[in-house]
Amino acid sequence: MSNRYVKHAKISDSKFKEIIRYFALDLDGLQIAELSGLNRNTVGRYLNLLRQRIAEYCEEELPPKKPMESSISTNMLDYASGLQTRNDGLIFGLFKSSDKIHTEMVSEDYSIKFRDVVRGIAPWEAIDYSINYWYDFDGLIEIGKNRYFRINQTNKGINGYMNHINSIKSFWSFSQMRLMKFRGVAKQSFYLHLKECEFRFNNRSQNLYGKIMDLVKKAPL
């Protein structure tokens, strides 16, 4: 079936737009399947493709990474797809740049370094060499434990620092509420849901349906 937005699609343009319309309203897969009359597995497949495209867009929106003496090159979508085989204790960082909140999965080597700090076992100063990561994070969170560690970015000044902290707290509260509504998410799909939260939060004042349609028009799924 011909579809301008999805390669090898088995549904029409109009039916795909209907899925996006419900997705923009933050309905879950079961609700969308019931409203659209589509099979739940079919809906799940398209939602997964949409989340992958959103994650790619969020990655494109990341500011340039800091140069490092020993760079760790990681494809985050591939990295995240293997999370179900990893041990607990993986970390992601939060930071604000240009009035947007960004999230970044911390590579496994760095997760090990940050983990004791997030868990309150070691002070940040004890491993401050690890600050030489790609980004200057405002906070760190351990996946699966919801442990949040706030990093003191005093170089931003008092007003700038408080603005950063309030934005980070608002994002994390928003994300927790969304993930709770969906009764949690599987570890292997956590990255996609995290990026979806980032996308929704940063575009909360925009027309999400129109924004998502622009993404799939530019790069069909």
Image: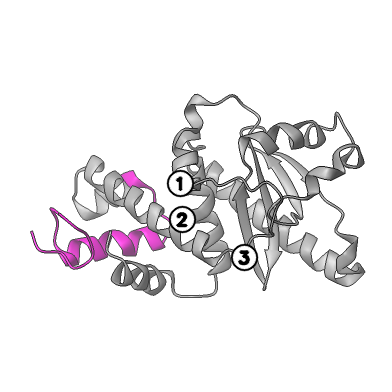
Mark toward the start of the polypeptide (1 vs 2): 2
Q: Out of 23 and 2, give the one closest to the viewer.
A: 2
C-alpha distance separating marks 1 and 3: 18 Å
**Foreground mark, 1 or 3?**
3
SS at circle 2: helix
In the rendered structure, are the residues bearing label 1 and label 3 in contact, judged by CB atoms less than 8 Å apart?
Answer: no
Numbered disc in front, either 1 or 2: 1
Give me the residue at 59% from left, 24% from top.
87
Which quadrant of the rendered structure holds the C terminus? bottom left
Disc 2 packing (10 Å; few <14; some 14–19; many ≥20): many
The kind of secondary structure element at disc 1 is helix
- Above or below residue 60? Residue 132 is above
**Nearest-to-viewer mark from 2 and 3:** 3
Q: Position of residue 135 (x, y in %)?
A: 70, 56
Find the distance from the CA under tag 1 to the CA under tag 2.
8 Å
Residue span colored magenta: 1-30
Q: Measuring from the top left, give residue 43's x and y in whole percent.
A: 26, 48
Could you classify mark 1 by the number of other residues whose Cα lies within 10 Å: few (under 14), some (14-19), or many (20 or more)?
some
Name the N-terminal-most of marks 2 and 3.
2
The CA distance from mark 2 to mark 3 is 17 Å
Camera sees residue 189: no
Find out whether residue 126 is within the magenta segment. no
Q: Locate residue 122: give its quadrant.
A: top right
Q: Which residue bears the numbered disc 3?
A: 64
Q: Amino acid at mark 1?
A: Leu
Q: Are marks 1 and 2 in contact (CB under 8 Å)?
A: yes
N-terminal-most mark, 1 or 3: 3
Residue at 18% across, 68% down: 4
Please give left or right for residue 217 compared with residue 137 in the image.
left
The x, y position of residue 79, in whole percent, is: 49, 40
Q: Is residue 64 left or right of residue 127?
A: left
Quarter of the image with the N terminus in it:
bottom left
